[in-house]
Image (tube, helix red, strand yellow):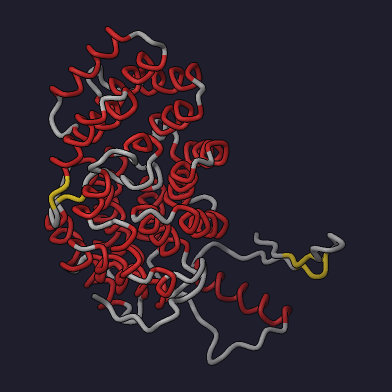
Amino acid sequence: MASPKRSSTCSDTALWSENFDREFGDIFAIQDEIASHVVDQLEIELAGNRPASQPVDPEAYALYLRAKNLVNKQNRDASLKAEELLEKSLAIDSQHAAAWLLYMTIYLQLAYFEGWSMPELALKARDPLEQALKVDPDNAQAKAHLARLSYDAMTTWPGEAQAVAYAMSLDPGTPMFNADAASFLREVGLVEEAVQYAAYAAQRDPLSARSQRALMLSHFAAGHFEEALAANRQMREITGGVGGLWYQGMIHLMAGDTQAALAAFDEWAAGSSDDNRYAVHGRTLVNLVRGEQAEFERGLEKLRQMPDNEWLVAIACSLAGQHDEAILTLDNMIDPPHNFGPPAMNTSPAFAALHDHPRWEELLRKRGTHPEQVAAIEPDMLFPGPGLPPAVPVDPP
């Protein structure tokens, strides 16, 4: 049974309600019937025909929902299991565009966990997106994702800006597109604007771990530590497990709460392998803040010996006052168009001490995110505000 209700927000009194008691069968037909009744009661005049859900085989849809729930966990094992479930779902019903689209989110997560290059990600994700467009030629998400996989979008900041803005031109109210805009703005140093877009995404889709993560990182970059912790808690409620604990520890650490930071890093370590680099990194930073220099140096050396760990080494060196090594480490990481350095390098509080270093602006220019380079992209025209389309026409890159 479903019971939609309309209430007054001023008086909190019910204005209309109705019960729909139906046999479980075609869930999409039931959904369309309820939507039609709600539109009638609200006396909304729709342009053209009322939209109808595309029918999907119930068994395939159940598998898709299970995969979607696993994707929200944001961990490697859950992503791999979600991929298996999607294959089963689409084997039953290959005309479900949303299922094809979910591959993009899965592959983005696996690219992070498995260390895929951008070309590897594009190679994996392009076919499912094209399949989604075959099923639904007007699908905004499929068009937007394909734009993000273009060479320019993957290898230049102006190209990525164009791709993200193109998505916003297709459907500016989509939470995913607003979260992506927040991520781009944070990366290029526009943190307060990033917070606005991320807050919009989280408000529109509060149960999305992706939206909450964007909000957490945007608040963290802006130095809003209490707000970042609130978003982190919300994200962790959604994902479960130890996901988000490293960021929780970093937020506490930047806010000056060493004990809370250590507790978060220890909890992370308890749920991870002994040589997990994030657990080692967290404890190393706690030793630094506690003044246990010998333990800090041992931890830092262990981090240096771990492969693909330059980002965490740079953070540790920056916070320890070893600024020359931090700058050199970042310089070695930045190699456009293959590598643009650590995420949110411009804005991360962990690198704030480097902003006065003689080579800092040189690094920003090498990365392509110096304020002058960012201004040339005209972000105020491409991203006039959350939930709004660009102020200028935007084509896909």
Q: How many marks?
A: 0
Residue ID at (65%, 88%): 45
In this view of the protein, which residue sits in the foreground, 311 or 96?
311
In this view of the protein, which residue sits in the foreground, 25 or 129?
129
Q: Indicate the position of residue 35 as horizontal and vertical percent values.
A: 61, 74
Q: Indicate the position of residue 320 as horizontal and vertical percent values.
A: 32, 22
Q: Tell me: residue 176, above or below residue 187.
A: below
Q: Would residue 140 be visible to someone looking at this image?
A: yes
Instruction: Report whether 33 appears left or right of 323.
Output: right
Instruction: Report whether 256 appears left or right of 267.
Output: right
Q: Indicate the position of residue 172 as horizontal and vertical percent values.
A: 47, 72
Q: Tell me: residue 234, above or below residue 12.
A: above
Q: Would residue 96 be visible to someone looking at this image?
A: no
Q: Tell me: residue 116, above or below residue 99.
A: above
In this view of the protein, which residue sits in the foreground, 255 or 277?
255
Residue ID at (29%, 67%): 145
Outermost residue toward the front in this view: 358
Instruction: Report whether 20 appears left or right of 341.
Output: right
Q: Quadrant of the N terminus?
A: bottom right
Residue ID at (47%, 19%): 258
Q: Quadrant of the C terminus?
A: bottom left
In this view of the protein, which residue sits in the foreground, 166 or 311?
311
Q: Quadrant of residue 158?
A: bottom left
Q: Quadrant of residue 305?
A: top left
Instruction: Report whether 206 appears left or right of 149.
Output: right
